[in-house]
Image (cartoon, rainbow, N blue to C red):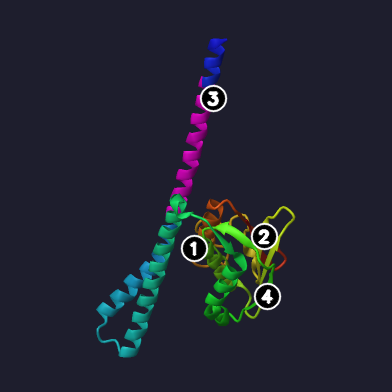
Amino acid sequence: MEFISIDREIEELIKLENDLSEKIKAQFIEYNQEMMFLAHDLKTPLTAIIGYTNLLIDNPELDRQKGNKYLEIVLDSSHQLETLINKFFELSKYSVQSDLLTKQNIKLEDIIIEIQESLYVERKKHDITLSNNLEENVYVDVNSELFARALINIYRNAVKYADRGSEVITNLTVNNQDKVSLSITNKFSSVNKVDVNKIFNTFYRGENSYEGNGLGLAIAKTIIEKQGSTIKAFQENNELTIVVEI
């Protein structure tokens, strides 16, 4: 009996080791994919910076108007590069630092309104209006700073990719099990080109519409799940809805 017990323990240890090996292998593959996408995204602004800088150096006789135009492209590309690098390190930080998750009891409605007001300029730029259906006096235990950052990323994504002149709709409810549900919905014509199963993946970008580095929703997902909540995406007709359950 003792030998059987030892054999079982050895089998369990071998299985555990194999499971860990597979998990590490999968993480390594994902890491390599992320590095590949990062290298691809870094290449675009770097190419512009190098190209237009060389153009300015090789053509000192360029008139002021053209020279300023090229300098603006270099500056804009530099900002794109900075944003990408900052978001990448931001995602890395949230993936490893669990000590940032000290929770506070906050009134969720106040956070939502504050974030919506902070995006006023972006909403006006895209001619987006807001429609809120918010249950009052809903309190949740979250890290207020990080949770707000996650919601900003979700709202910014909704505003940026919504059809011009459309609405971004927010619903906040509490079900019978005291589960808080926050949904943010936006309409856009190319929603069928977005893969909701991959939308939270690091560096995911849908066809045409989802240009950019694709880190915003990945960061939001990391923050929300580290606090014990869930986030999902749903597509119906020409609407995309992000649902956070706390």
Label the magenta part by its dominant secondary structure.
Answer: helix
Answer with mark 4 or mark 2, whichever residue precedes in sequence.
4
Q: Nearer the viewer, mark 3 or mark 2?
A: 2
- Front residue of 86/99: it is 99
User: As drawn, is 108 to the left or to the right of 219?
Assistant: right
Report which residue position mark 1 lands on.
145
Q: Quadrant of residue 80?
A: bottom left
**Do the CB atoms of the residues marked 4 and 3 lie less than 8 Å apart?**
no
Amino acid marked by disc 3: Glu
Q: Give the residue pinned by disc 4.
A: 131
Residue 31 image position (x, y, % from top left): 45, 49
Magenta region, residue range:
10-35
Q: Residues within 10 Å of mark 2 (few under 14, many from 20)?
A: some
The disc, 1 or 3, on the residue closer to the chain's N-terminal end is 3
First-in-chain label (1 vs 2): 1
Which element carries disc 2, helix, strand or loop?
Answer: strand
Q: Position of residue 50 (x, y in %)?
A: 32, 70
Indicate the amino acid at tag 2: Ser
- Calculate the distance from the C-alpha at mark 3 to the C-alpha at mark 2: 40 Å
Secondary structure beneath disc 3? Answer: helix
Viewer-nearest residue: 229 or 175: 175
Q: Disc 2 marks which residue?
A: 181
Q: CA distance from mark 1 to mark 2?
A: 19 Å
